[in-house]
Image: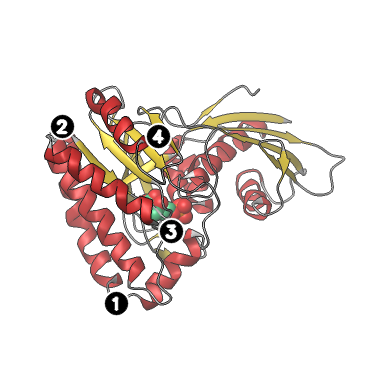
Amino acid sequence: MQGAAIAQPNIALIKYWGKRDLERNLPAVGSISITLRELQTRMLLDFDEALREDQLTVNDVPDQKMLPRLSACLDRVVGEDRMRAHIRSECNFPIAAGLASSASSFAALTVAAADAADKSLTRAELANLAGAASGSAARSLFGGFVELENTNDGIAVGTLTAADEWPLSVVVAITETGPKAVGSTEAMEISRKTSPFYSSWIDRQAADLDAARTAIIERDFARLARVAEHNCLKMHSVMWASRPPMVYWNAATMRCLETVRALQARDVAVFFTIDAGPQVKAVCLPEYETEVEAALRAIDGVRKTMVSGMGPGASRGTFG
Ligand code: PMV
C-alpha cells in the first residue's frame, strides 16, 4: 500500500487564531488565505505489515517530534487498525518556523493516506481531516484565494477566486531558520485564556472577512492590503497582550515592516503579513515582485528570501 501527494503552504490574509473546540481542533474564527505555488511539501507513504511503529523522515533525517501528530492523522484517515507506515516528507523551505509547513505537511499527508488506502474522499472531506490535524492545513486542499468558514458542526472550505483569476506574488523574508519556541496550538490556548483582547478579536473577525472577501471579488488591492495588515497586527496584539506574552518578532521583522511602508510610500502595491514566527510575507502585484524582493533581501537580518506565485490545492503526486 503506497500513496504520494504534494501540497503547498498557504498564507492567511485574514488569520485563524484560537480554537473553539480543542479536541476536534475546530477554529474559533473563519479565515481567508492564499495558496502558494513554489513552496512545497512532498509526502510518500508506504504501509508495511512488518513495521511495529510508524517511521518518519523529513528531508531524509529521522524525526520523532512530529511523528505522534502524523500518526494520529493517519489513524483518522485510514482507521486505527491500519498497518504502520514509513512516512517520507520532503520540504523545500524551513520547517516549523512560521512558514506554514504544518499546513502543507498535513494536507499532503491526508491526500497521500487516502490515496494509499484507496479511499475516494471528496475535497471537503479531505479538508476536514487535514483540519483536524492542523487548522490551517484544511485551506491547503484548495488553490487560489481560499475561505474557511465555521459551520455548526465543523468547517466549510472552498476557493473564492482561482489563482489565475487574480495572481498575486508573495516574497517571504526569512529572518530566522530555527523552529519557533512556542507552537501555535499552545500559543492559541494561552491567548484564549489570558489575553484581554481575545474576545474582541473574535467579535471583529466577521467584519474583516467581509471586507477581504469583497476586496478579492472586486480585485481591489488597496482595500485587501488595508484589512490584511490590520488583521495581522490585531492578531499579534492579542499575542503580545497574553501572559506570558507571545512575541514572535525579532528586530529584522520590524525592519521588514518599515521597508514595506517605504515601498508603499512610493506607490508600490505591496502589503505585509506575519504568522506565528518572525518571517515577513510581503504580498504584492506580480509587476512589483522584483523590486519588493530586492528591498527585503537588502535588509540587515534577512537571511534569505523566497518568492512564490499562487498555486493549486494539494494533489496526489509522484515522489522523488
Ligand atoms: O494551523 P496552525 O495550528 O499551524 O495555526 C496557524 C495559525 C496562523 O498561521 C498564525 C494563522 C493562520 O490562519 O494560518
Alpha carbon distance from label 3 to label 1: 22 Å
- Image location of residue 166, percent across then percent down: 23, 26
Q: Which mark is residue 142?
A: 4
Residue holding disc 3: 26
Relative height, residue 234 to residue 222 (above, below): below
N-term mark: 2 or 4: 4
Alpha carbon distance from label 2 to label 4: 19 Å
**Residue positioned 30% across, 39% down in the render:** 282
N-term mark: 4 or 1: 4
Query: Crowding at label 2, few (<14), some or many (≥20) Cα neighbours within 10 Å?
Result: some
Relative height, residue 309 to residue 106 (above, below): above
Residue holding disc 1: 196
In the image, 82: left or right of 216? right
Q: Secondary structure at mark 4?
A: loop
**Residue positioned 43% across, 53% down in the render:** 277
Q: Secondary structure at mark 1?
A: loop
